[in-house]
């Protein structure tokens, strides 16, 4: 418990120090001016945004794209990965193709997505699905393939059928891998939802940041970026906590 | 001979799906009149024309140059900083929450801040790339240096290694795999931010070229841009993997033994 008690003040202390440095750097020296907002200006702007319904609509739209995109990618990718992972042939045939798409950042597709789908919520969702589907499927397939062979042989000796083997051996063993992929996918979905707005003109916080930047209002731009940091942090913490509960046996 | 046979089999098994997909796309789109999905052979012709003859020097080189310069600056700043912070438990406890927060911001969202600060030229692009790529590298270096095996440290102490020797011979080599993971994430982020900084800060570069093509409904050019960006994303990642494999050969060897 002392570790916990000491950790919270440490974060608080360093946050205060950083805010102070930020304030000083923004008030005196070469950075002072309209193009740079100080910590206090950014925080005041953030509080101002809280009273603005446009801001909350943007938060909602971003979360909507992230959550639907995340859920869709899971619903598609986990069963797909399961199917692929069941046979050595399908696993090895799809590995290269999936790896190829996995490392292509979704931002690359934005120009085409703008043409085909248009700058909308649907575009953000589609990009989030593209960002996650390949990685999660491959990770799931890997977990399924990685099941302890002795365990499978034992089950076969007991004449458990294929479904039972999947249900009681393969899926639980893949759960750890799926959990890792889930965590990455959740943060990636949020990032993609923001990027879709910022770069592709889809609605949400990304577009709001772009609008404030082109209007030259530094304080509001910073306020949106701060909001994004908070959202990102909360998402990753939440996922870690949920995971500990969901896959308690994997020890991760 | 047997090794070649096995290699060939692996290529066949890994390769049939992409070949099938490309063939399908090629044939299915051959007579396409849909303005958004032009025939693949037309895209391919435009691709060769654009990237071999026309725009390689004007649009691709600046992108790669900013990417590499920005990333290298990030490496030079973040690794030493990470080593310093990670060597002391107290500093690490204070620095980590802040780094963790900044890393939670989607990297592309930092670009507007740098546009406000530095305008639209390449200093803005490099600064955004450097800033965004630094944090994963910094965080992983701190983590890697801090998480040195206690038994190893005790052993080093028993052998009366000096602080410097412990740093260079024990802590740093041990941190290498974690640092490399950070470098890889940092590089992927650098690539994304490089593209985003071009799209947001209009002008030259591959990202800007592709988005301008989209906005002016030059669909073929947009497709070639997307394709080249995708291929670049893949190839750069591959290069990174190879470098990692070579520099961390001892580590992978060690893991195989275990």
Image: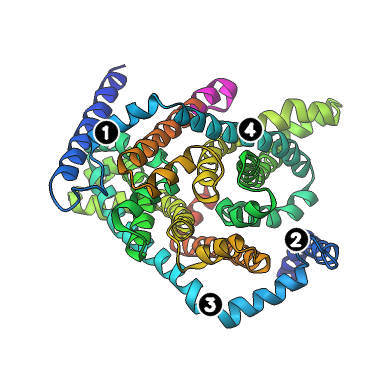
Q: Chain of mark 4?
A: A
Q: Is residue A141 above or below residue B69?
A: above
Residue matched to label 2: B37
Q: Are marks 2 and 4 in contact (CB under 8 Å)?
A: no
Q: In the rendered structure, does residue A243 fall within the stretch colored magenta?
A: yes
Query: Alpha carbon of mark 1 to alpha carbon of mark 3: how far?
Result: 47 Å
The circle drawn on residue A202 is none
Residue extending farthest to the front is A215
Of circles 1 and 2, which is in front?
Answer: 2
CA neighbours of label 2 inside 10 A, class few (<14), some (14 to 19), many (20+): some
Q: Which residues are magenta?
A: A239-251
Is label 2 in a helix, a strand or a loop? loop
Separation (CA) of disc 1 from disc 2? 53 Å
Residue at which label 3 appears: B56
- Tell me how far mark 3 sits from mark 4, CA to CA: 38 Å
Question: Image quadrant for the N terminus of chain A?
Answer: top left
Q: How is the image coloured?
A: rainbow
Image-quadrant location for residue A47: top left
Task: Work out whether disc 1 and disc 4 sit on a shared chain.
Answer: no
Question: Label 1: which residue?
Answer: B93
Where residue B137 sits: x, y (%)?
37, 50
Q: Residues within 10 Å of mark 4 (few under 14, many from 20)?
A: some
Q: Residue at x 65, y 48 (%)?
A: A118
Residue A38 spot, x, y in % from top left: 23, 39
Judge the density around disc 3: few (<14), some (14-19), many (≥20) Cα neighbours within 10 Å: some
Q: Residue at x 74, y 49 (%)?
A: A91
């Amino acid at each position: 418990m002392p570790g916990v008690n000491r950790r919270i003040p440490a974060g608080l202390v360093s946050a205060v120090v950083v805010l102070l440095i930020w304030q000083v750097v923004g008030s005196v020296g070469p950075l002072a001016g309209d193009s740079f907002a100080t910590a206090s200006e950014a925080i005041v702007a953030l509080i101002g945004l809280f009273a603005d319904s446009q801001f909350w609509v943007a938060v909602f739209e971003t979360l909507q794209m992230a959550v639907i995109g995340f859920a869709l990618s899971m619903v598609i990718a986990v069963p797909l990965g399961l199917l692929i992972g069941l046979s050595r042939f399908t696993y090895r045939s799809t590995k290269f193709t999936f790896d190829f798409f996995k490392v292509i950042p979704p931002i690359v597709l934005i120009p085409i997505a703008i043409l085909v789908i248009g700058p909308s919520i649907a575009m953000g969702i589609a990009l989030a699905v593209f960002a996650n589907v390949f990685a999660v499927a491959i990770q799931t397939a890997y977990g399924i393939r990685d099941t302890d062979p002795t365990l499978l042989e034992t089950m076969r000796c007991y004449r458990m059928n294929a479904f039972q083997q999947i249900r009681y051996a393969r899926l639980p063993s893949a759960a750890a891998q799926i959990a890792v992929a889930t965590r990455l996918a959740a943060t990636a979905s949020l990032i993609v939802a923001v990027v879709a707005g910022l770069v592709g003109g889809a609605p949400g916080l990304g577009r709001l940041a772009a609008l404030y930047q082109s209007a030259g209002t530094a304080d509001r731009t910073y306020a949106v970026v701060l909001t994004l940091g908070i959202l990102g942090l909360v998402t990753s913490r939440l996922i870690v906590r949920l995971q500990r509960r969901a896959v308690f046996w994997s020890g991760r | 001979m047997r090794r070649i046979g096995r290699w060939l089999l692996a290529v066949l098994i890994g390769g049939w799906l992409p070949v099938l997909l490309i063939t399908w796309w090629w044939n299915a789109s051959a007579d396409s009149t849909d303005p958004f999905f032009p025939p693949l052979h037309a895209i391919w012709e435009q691709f060769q024309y654009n990237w071999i003859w026309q725009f390689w020097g004007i649009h691709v080189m600046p992108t790669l140059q900013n990417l590499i310069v920005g990333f290298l600056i990030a490496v030079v700043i973040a690794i030493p900083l990470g080593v310093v912070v990670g060597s002391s438990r107290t500093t690490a406890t204070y620095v980590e929450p802040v780094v963790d927060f900044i890393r939670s911001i989607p990297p592309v969202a930092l670009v507007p801040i740098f546009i406000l600060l530095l305008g639209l030229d390449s200093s803005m692009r490099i600064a955004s790339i450097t800033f965004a790529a630094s944090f994963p590298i910094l965080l992983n270096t701190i983590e890697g240096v801090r998480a040195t095996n206690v038994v190893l440290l005790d052993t080093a102490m028993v052998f009366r290694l000096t602080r410097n020797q412990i740093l260079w011979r024990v802590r740093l080599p041990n941190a290498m795999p974690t640092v490399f993971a950070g470098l890889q994430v940092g590089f992927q982020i650098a690539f994304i931010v490089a593209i985003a900084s071009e799209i947001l800060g209009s002008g030259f570069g591959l990202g800007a070229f592709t988005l301008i093509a989209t906005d002016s409904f030059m669909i073929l050019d947009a497709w070639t841009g997307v394709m080249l960006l995708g291929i670049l994303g893949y190839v750069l990642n591959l290069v990174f993997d190879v470098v990692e494999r070579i520099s961390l050969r001892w580590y992978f060897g060690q893991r195989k033994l275990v």
